[in-house]
Amino acid sequence: MGQPQIEENGRQEISPRETMRGLPKIVQPYLTWITGVPLQGGKQLIPWSPAKAGLLGLGQMAAGISVGAWALHPFTAWSVPVLILCWLVTSGGMRRLDVVVIHQTLHRMFTKSVRGNRIVGELISTFFWRSPYDDNRKEHLAHHAFPCSLKDGDTHYLLSTGMRPGMTRSEFRKYIWGALFSPSHHSRFFFGRLKSNFIGVQPRYRLVMSVVYLAAVATFIALTGWWMEWLVLWLVPVSVFFQSCTYLYTMTEHRWWLFGNHERLPRDQRDLLTFGRFCGEAVPDDSVTGLRKAAAWTRWTFRMLVVHSSYRMFVLVGDTVQHDLHHVMPACDWANSPWIRADDVGNRPERYTEVWGSLADHLRAAGQVDNVMTGLPEGVVPTEWSESATQLASASASSAPSGAESPGQ
């Protein structure tokens, strides 16, 4: 199993994951999960499968709802922070079922049969008010055929939030917070989801599923009187929190503006649109001593346990860390992506790039904020902003695809 060393300024540097080799063996599986990268020569302790990935999503969602229900009765001052955490946990579980399970059904890689993938995809998308299977699959395959182009619905979605190439860090920060807390953004996103489930739905059985699900929810609330519990424990996480995590995930998914949103790109440029979003940072250097060493290790531990773990639990869930592998090898053993990617990098390293750090680092790299070139090979020349702006401006006059209101997988 190979893992490339990070090359910076013409010299080889050890990967942040390899700096963690000296830590106790008991924490190594956790570090592999959080970073998305196994140690060179490391052995996989638990083989994963699509079924296990789906059960993990269900378990995370159930845990968030259960603890949230406990926090509601009785409702105290402590209930507020507990509920916020539960909303994040619940929405993270929903995201696992959406961006991992539904995503793989679109590629017919979750079950062994075409019908099985359709059934799983339709059921989950009905429960979460996501696009019907056929529409979702058509849009997602277009994303793979024309990534980051103006034929990609996700590109139009980001444009609809106000994202533009060439932002400074201060402009980007203002844009991010504005979009996350924008009532307009969330209402368009949510009602777009409802519309896709109840208006003009094809095939007809999918409309029947949506109506039956709505009737079942209404009946459940009427019989139990748990309307407040449903609003707090289900509607809040499936709307605002789910959408916020989806937005942040989509923002970091690709280097959206790198090559001016051109439809046709050579393979080497297409590969650069996607990168390994690895979470974490190198352990403190041995040269640090005394109180500075204690402070450095305290900071590192806090960031790994809180900053990076939260990112992995709520936004960058499942195999999405290795999303570049998915675009290089869509038919791979995705449930075991960390090891599959490490092997493939050893065979053809030229097809992979990576960015280490936190959500903020990945946002800046994907959006090329302040013209940041993190993770890009030396000699890569991005398309001029003016050229990108011209394409985006010309596209605004035409009708955007369905993904303009909400992103696909």
Image (cartoon, rainbow, N blue to C red):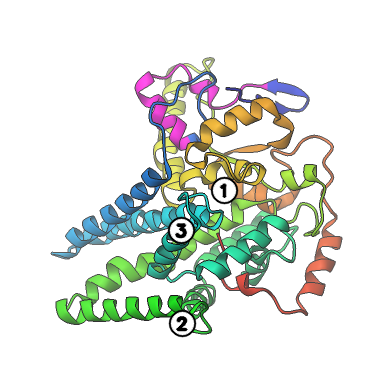
Label 2 vs 1, first from the N-terminus: 2
Residue 392 vs 372, above or below: the answer is: below
Label 2 vs 3, first from the N-terminus: 3
- The percent coordinates of residue 98 (x first, y second) are 46, 58
Closer to viewer: mark 1 or mark 3: 3
Q: Amino acid at mark 2?
A: Phe
- Please rate how many residues cluster around mark 1, counting C-alpha atoms within 10 Å: few if below 14, some from 14 to 19, many from 20: few
CA gap, disc 1 and disc 3: 23 Å
Q: Which residues are magenta?
A: 13-34
99 and 356: which one is in front? 99
Residue at point 60% right, 56% down?
Answer: 251
**Residue 98 badge:** 3
What secondary structure is marked by label 3?
helix
What secondary structure is marked by label 1?
helix
Return the residue at label 2.
Answer: 198
Residue at point 80% right, 34% down?
Answer: 378
273 and 215: which one is in front? 215
CA gap, disc 2 and disc 1: 37 Å
137 sits to left or right of 93: right
Residue at point 41% right, 47% down?
Answer: 313
Residues under numbered marks 2 and 3 in contact, where contact means CB atoms less than 8 Å apart: no
Q: Quadrant of the C terminus?
A: bottom right
Farthest residue in the left direction?
74
- The percent coordinates of residue 16 (x first, y second) are 56, 27
